[in-house]
Amino acid sequence: MLDTTSFLSRLKAILAHNELSSAAFADLINVQRSSISHLLNGRNKPSLEFIMKVNDAFPEVDLQWLLYGTGSFPNTEITPNPSPTITKKEKIEKDTDKKLERIIMFYNDGTFKTYTEF
């Protein structure tokens, strides 16, 4: 049986390793953002479909490690992908057909700065 608490800690390790927010992670594996929120808050348990989406999106994640904590993360036995390196931004945009339009940074003094060129 899957220990949900341990699974969630490993899922959070994947997010941290890839520097992804829960929203970006949801977009990347093509699930609703609320699904990730419910999982991380312990409201729901991961489905097989969810686990397989994580496995497909992150080849460096060993399925045995994700499910049971055995093995290592990231998996160092993977054959490197011969294709050019794709940035996280490009991968998210490719998988979701969404394009980053702008970034707005809000500061604690009430000011903000908008970036539209990347």
Image: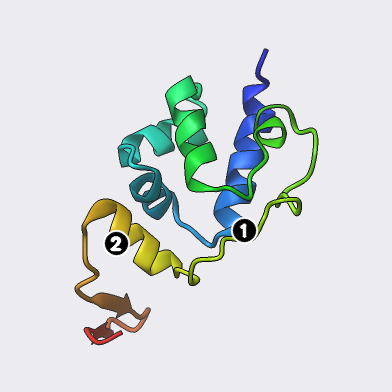
| Residue 85 screen position, x and y as percent | 50, 71
Q: Residues within 10 Å of mark 2 (few under 14, many from 20)?
A: some
Please tell me which residue lies in front, 28 or 112: 28
Q: Quadrant of the N terminus?
A: top right
Mark 2 or mark 1: name the one nearer the start of the chain.
1
Label 1, secondary structure: give it. helix
| Residue 94 screen position, x and y as percent | 30, 59
Please determine whether, in this image, residue 60 is positioned above or below residue 101: above
The residue indicated by pointer 1 is: 17
Q: Amino acid at mark 2?
A: Glu
Please tell me which residue lies in front, 18 or 21: 18
Q: Amino acid at mark 1?
A: His
Image-quadrant location for residue 2: top right
Please determine whether, in this image, residue 89 is positioned above or below residue 30: below
Please tell me which residue lies in front, 6 or 69: 69
Give the residue drawn at x 59%, y 56%. Answer: 16
The residue indicated by pointer 2 is: 93
